[in-house]
Image: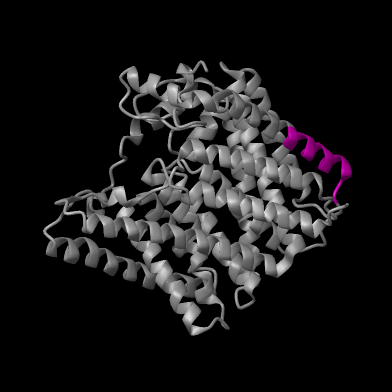
Amino acid sequence: MSVSLQQRGNIFLVAAACLLVIGVCAPFSGHDVQRVVQIALGVCAVLYGLSVSPIERWVDRPTASGLCLVILLGLLSSALAHQPLWAFAEVALFISCGAIAVAFASLRRHGAAPLDRVLILIVVLLCMIKSIQYLYAAGLAFTSGQQLLDPDLLLSGFSNKRFYGQFQTFTLPLLALPLLIPNVTRSVRGAAFALLCVWWLIAISGGTRGTWLGMAVAGAVLALLGPWGRRWLACQLAAVCGGLLLYWLFFTVLAGGLGIEVSNGASDRLTTSLSGRGPIWWQAWHMIVERPWLGFGPMHFADIPNAIAAHPHQAVLQWASEWGVPSALCVAILAGRAAWATVSVVRERALSDERADLLRLCLFAALIGAMTQSMVDGVIVMPNSQVWLALVVGWLMALHRWRAPAAAALPLAWGSWKTLGVLAVGLLVFFVIRDVSHLAQAQQRYLGDGSQHLQPRFWAQGVIALQSP
């Protein structure tokens, strides 16, 4: 019995939704679980892509040429790297993220506007579950009788609160969509605003400055893109005030009334310190100076041990030091062209109140916030953030309005892309099969050697210089 294109899309959507819930909401979730979830989603995306034949191209010829150049440079850099297999794994992650983006773009292109509602409902559901988990943990903390409360301990599902903050950077802009749509009922609008306030409460108490910076830059940009951008900013500012009020009620009024001392408060994060990033930024810079053309190889910042991190917490430095300066310039040009194309569409549709146009605005805000945060954090490294970056990019690709009719897809190019996707997820599945049973032992061995904390990269223990699974 043959399965229709719509049924195949529905199967992929259900699988993706289940994987997103597991990766974000499961109590046992963490970096390694999220990496496995990402690879599983990549497999689903490739399988769905094999069953879809695009009628028109997803990108124009210069973009396609640039992507091919980036992949070729990455493969060449990997072949010359100290540990080629790990380097190829990083390239495979890049390709699998592309497959996820194309899969979501195809899904939305065939599902049209109803698919937007489903995806937004998934986002709302995820944020609602995380909000309930947070409030439940806060309730337990306030009634436990303990005299000391650390708000960081209320966060769950992520190995580090910064990774939680990265997820919020992607979702905070999207939660404002129901507040922009004109014909939404007052009750739905009120519920959406309440959820956005709680989500800001978590962002404030989590203290991830990269999230605050990303949202500030996104707000500044959207304020210049028309009345709906300014309304989006007004909704976010109102929700920030609501979040600050909730934070004050919980961690000042209620905590003070119960005689509970709060440690690691949000005010402690109001600093301009680099939080240890200086040495790893210098390490990346020295790597660039030593090997500017092809870099040390993808993932190979983690091949030079340091006491801080397995990645430099800065997207440009990371790409240039590992993939090489030419590849970094190519990626920057591609990102700039894509951003300008989106800005052009947003400005052209600045007065439109159609859902697709308002959604594009929110997605663009999420992308701006994430790219800003990637300048000070590992957005392009963490598995959950890579998945959401691919989802947002794919969604924007599907919503994009071409100025000229899109050219027909080339069968050879599409076939080559599908082959690359199969090879990429095949290599990633190999790593899962090879490493998963040894992850706990690798972490214990690393910490047993005197290291103070894990340094996530591909796995939670990401220092590949010490790994021999």
From the top left corner, tell me how far across and down residue 191 is, in percent.
45, 75
* One can see residue 289 in this view: yes
Could you tell me how many numbered marks the image carries?
A: 0
Pick the residue in front: 236 or 48. 48
Q: Tell me the magenta residue range.
A: 409-422
Residue 379 falls within the magenta-colored stretch: no
Q: At 53% from the left edge and 76% from the top edge, which residue is drawn?
A: 180
Q: Main secondary structure of the magenta part?
A: helix
Reply above or below: 77 against 192.
Answer: above
Q: Is residue 418 magenta?
A: yes
> Taking 383 as reference, is 450 left or right?
left
Indicate left or right for 20 with 405 as reference: left
Q: Is residue 239 above or below residue 381?
A: below
State the image quarter where residue 283 is shown: top left
Residue at 81% of width from left, 47% of height from top? 51
- Residue at 13% over, 65% down: 257
* Colour basis: one colour
The one nearer the camera, 42 or 99, is 42
User: Residue 24 location in percent, x, y?
Assistant: 49, 50
| Position of 311 relative to 38 (above/below) | above
Above or below for 438 versus 389: above
Going by the image, does 434 lie left or right of 31?
right
Q: Nearer the viewer, residue 428 or 392?
A: 428
